[in-house]
Image: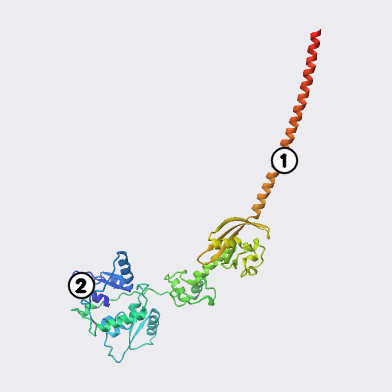
Amino acid sequence: VSPMQAHCMKLKKEHPGAKTVFIGPCISKKAEAEEYPGSVDCVLTFEELSGWLAETDTVLSHETDDDGVEKGKTRFFPTAGGILKTMLCDNGDYTYMSVDGMSSCIHAVKDIEKGNIHHCFIEMSACPGSCIGGPAMEKNHRAPIRDYITVRRFAEEAGDKDFEHGDFKEEELSKNLIYLASPHNMAGSRAIEEILRKMGKQKPEDELNCGSCGYNTCREKAQAVFEGKANLEMCLPFLKDKAEKFSDNILNNTPNGILILNEDMVVQQINSAAREIMNIRYASDVVGEPVVRILEPFDFMDVLSNGRDIHDKRVYLAEYKKYIEETIVYDHVYHILMCIMRDVTAEETEREKKAELSRQTIEITDKVVEKQMRIVQEIASLLGETTAETKIALTKLKESLKDE
C-alpha cells in the first residue's frame, strides 16, 4: 500500500471509529482513496484547505506544539529521492536512483521497455521535485528550493528513526494494483497531418513545439487529439493565429472604415474601406505616418485629452469631398485611438437633393398661390365693374317706367 494508506490504516487501528483525512498537494490521492476504500475517508488538497479556511474566516495565528508529531526519517518522503533515503540501499548489485518529472519518468520507462536498463532500483515521481512540486500547491507558494530545504531540515531534526507501522502483517500492507492502461491506438501519418492542418499547422515550420499545450511536440498533441484526450483549441499559437485572422477578417471585410492611431497620433493600421474613403492606394503609404497627413487631428486630440469618446459625428472631408459619420474611441488598456468611419456621402447627397426639391416645390407653390391671388383679384375687380353698370342700367329703366 502507499504511505498514505499505511498511515491511515495505523490511525484507524489505534483509534477505532476515527475518520482519516489526508491533506497534501496531490490530486491523484483522491482517485487512490476511491479505488481502494476503507482506509482513507477524505482527501483534501492544500488549495482546498486554504479556500475552506478563507471561506470560514479561520486564521491560524500560531503553530501548535509537536508533541503528537511522529518522528522519523520518513519525513523525507515528499522530496525527490525521499523514499530512497528511508531505505538501506545496501545491495551492491543494484544502482539506486530517483527520477522526477513526467518527461523524465516516461523516458526512463521507455528505456526499461527497450531493455536498456538492468539492476536498477528507480524511485519515480511524476511531479518535478516529487510531492513538494505537486499540482495542488497554493499558487502563491511556489518555491521548490526553499521547500526542499525546509523539508530536509525538518526530516533531519526528526532523527534517523524508522516509522512504527504497528502490528500489521505483511499481507495487510499489500494490495492488488488495478490495471489503468487503455488501448493505445496510434494515428496514421495521414490522420496526424489532417489534425495538424486543423490546428493551423500547414507546413513543418508551423510546428513550433512550444509546449504551451502540455505536450512536448505538436505531433504528440495531434496524437492526443486523435485519442480524444485533447482538443484542437488547446494550442496557444493556434488560438493567437485564429484570433488575429478573425480580427483581420473583420477589419478587412467590414464596410466601415477603420483607422487605428497610437497616442502620438501616428497611424498604426488602416483597412481597405478607410483607404477607399480617403483615396489611399496602399496601407503602407500612411502606416507609420502622422494622422495629420490624411485627416484633421482635432477630434482625435479632443478624445485623447478629455477622455470622452465621440459617437456618430457627421463630418465633411473637404479634401476628399466625402461626408462621414465618425466614432472615435480611446482604449485605455492598449493606449490606442480607434476611429470608425461610415461613408454617408450618398445619404448626404440624397438629403441635399430632397432639400433642394422641397425648396423648389415651396417656391413653385408660392408662385402658384401668388398668381391665383392676382386672378382672384382681377375677377373681383371685373365683377365689381359689371355689377355697378347693371345697377345703373336697371335704375334708369325703373325711372323711365315711372315717367310713363
Q: Is residue 399 placed above or below 293 in the rendered structure?
A: above
Residue 377: horizontal and vertical position, in percent? Answer: 74, 30
Quickly name the residue at label 2: 12
As rendered, which of 200 and 174 lies closer to the eye?
Answer: 200
Q: Quadrant of residue 24?
A: bottom left
Q: Residue furthest top?
A: 404
Label at residue 217: none
Q: Residues within 10 Å of mark 2 (few under 14, many from 20)?
A: some
Q: Is residue 356 placed above or below 333 in the rendered structure?
A: above
Quadrant, the C terminus? top right
Quickly name the residue at label 1: 364
Which color scheme is applied? Answer: rainbow
**Kind of residue at disc 1:** Ile
**Kind of residue at disc 2:** Lys
Circle 1 sits in a helix, a strand or a loop, which is it? helix
Mark 1 vs mark 2: which is more N-terminal? 2
Asked if one can make out residue 88 in the rendered structure from this viewpoint, the answer is yes
